[in-house]
Image (cartoon, rainbow, N blue to C red):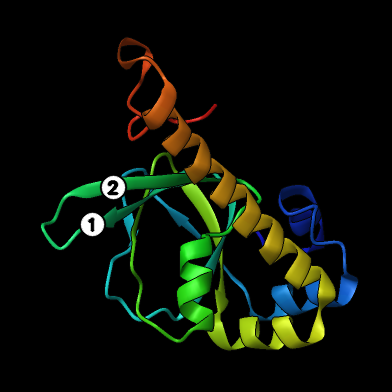
Amino acid sequence: MILNTAYLKKHLPQIEDGLLRDDLLGHGLLKTFPAGQTILTDKQYIDYIPLITRGGAKVIHYTNEQKALFLYFLQEGETCTMTLSSCLKRETSRVRAKTITETEIILVPVERIYYYTRHFASWNEFALMSFQAKFDAILRAFEGLAFAPLNGRYNTYEAWPR
């Protein structure tokens, strides 16, 4: 695929600001990752923020005892809020992300994210919507653990939303 305005409008329609779109075109890098590829590891320095345009990934946190805690899925039109948070706080990653299917991602350099937060209200709205969506997903998972009958629970770690 070629990263152009039509591609952005199709896969990231919530980014409507033409100047922001133009900047993404000028600085973003469109890459395709095969299914099962680790695209982010914990304790990694973050150079790029991912914007998922096709496919998806699962985001997992590993405890100090190396126990995996599934957090959420990333799908088309989304970004990883844990990565965004680490980027803005200038910390290393606290999560790992692995593609579920072949996945296209626009990689946006971290320095552009700092610029976007200061100059584009539409970027801030996109980021806040992303945080809200992933926070809601985590709350639903905790509600399921706390209140669903034991025999009615399913393994969200393996369940990919379709």
The amino acid on which the numbered mark 2 sits, given as a three-letter code, is: Leu
Secondary structure, mark 2, is strand
Compared with residue 125, is residue 60 higher up or lower down, i.e. above or below?
A: above
Name the quadrant of the C terminus.
top right
Q: Is residue 6 visible?
A: yes
Residue 104 percent location from the top left of the image? 53, 53
Q: Which residue occupies 41% across, 20% down?
A: 148
| Distance of label 2 from label 1 (alpha carbons) | 6 Å
Residue 81 percent location from the top left of the image? 53, 62
Q: Nearer the viewer, residue 21 or 160?
A: 160
- Label drawn at residue 62: 1
Compared with residue 43, is residue 37 higher up or lower down, i.e. above or below?
A: above
- The residue under label 2 is 69
Q: Nearer the viewer, residue 94 or 111?
A: 94
Label 1: few (<14), some or many (≥20) within 10 Å? some
Q: Which residue occupies 63% across, 81% down?
A: 113
Residue 94, by quadrant, is bottom left
Q: Is the Cβ of the residue at disc 2 closer than 8 Å to that at disc 1?
A: yes
Q: Earlier in the sequence, mark 2 or mark 1?
A: 1
The amino acid on which the numbered mark 1 sits, given as a three-letter code, is: Tyr
Residue 46, by quadrant, is bottom left
